[in-house]
Amino acid sequence: MSQARRRPELGGVAVLVVVTILATLAAPHARTVRGLVAGGLAELPAIGRPGRAPATGGGGDRVGRAVAFALRQRGKPYRWGAEGPDAFDCSGLTWAAWRASGVSIPRTAAGQLADLPRVRGRLQPGDLLIYRTDGPSRRHVAMVVSRGRMVEALGRGIPVRATSIRGRWLGAVRPGAN
């Protein structure tokens, strides 16, 4: 018999270690994977291919288009009062994103907070978060793009970016909600 024979129990331990590491790495994405396995793509707006909205069915198509539009603007400069296509201010970004999806919303962050339906329950992609700010309008708005993430045009010198959702918002609204 060959002395180079492996002990079978060590092979099983190695597989267990690899599976445990992979599960740990995948845990933050488990919800997205479950949605894909179940056939729903509603969790994909933040990771979808640029220029394409995920197929979510029903009113979700508009949400997917709005989120995809906002994400495509990343890297563009902030400019007060800008509505695109080359630069955006915060509410110009959210206004243009929803407009691109066929939904009309107020142009300013204050108008969006005052006129759109409030979010009840969990935040969803496409929801708008309004924050208090020291800027000229006293309000800032960002769009939720996935669980824990938002896209925003924060201010001068900071290009449009995706970032973690910050707490302490004044309100959350849902464009297109009936």
Image (cartoon, helix red, strand yellow):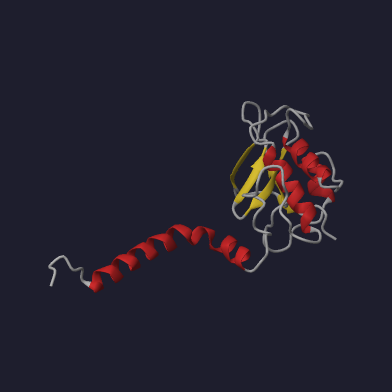
Q: Quick check: 17 above or below 82? A: below
> Which of 113 and 70 lies nearest the eye of the viewer?
70
Residue 120, horizontal then vertical, whole percent: 73, 62
Q: Is residue 76 visible?
A: yes
Q: Quadrant of the N terminus?
A: bottom left
Residue 160, horizontal then vertical, whole percent: 65, 35
User: Quick check: 102 left or right of 5?
Assistant: right
Question: Total of numbered circles in the picture?
Answer: 0
> Which of 128 and 113 lies nearest the eye of the viewer?
128
User: Quick check: 23 left or right of 158?
Assistant: left
- Residue under the point 53% across and 58% down: 29
Q: Quick check: 88 above or below 147? A: above
Which residue of the protein is positioned furthest toward the front in this rendering?
1
Residue 34, horizontal then vertical, whole percent: 58, 66
- Residue under the point 48% across and 59% down: 26
User: Quick check: 28 left or right of 71?
Assistant: left
Residue 17, horizontal then vertical, whole percent: 33, 64
Q: Is residue 141 visible?
A: no
Q: Quadrant of the C terminus?
A: bottom right
Q: Quick check: 79 above or below 113? A: above
- Residue under the point 78% across and 61% down: 57
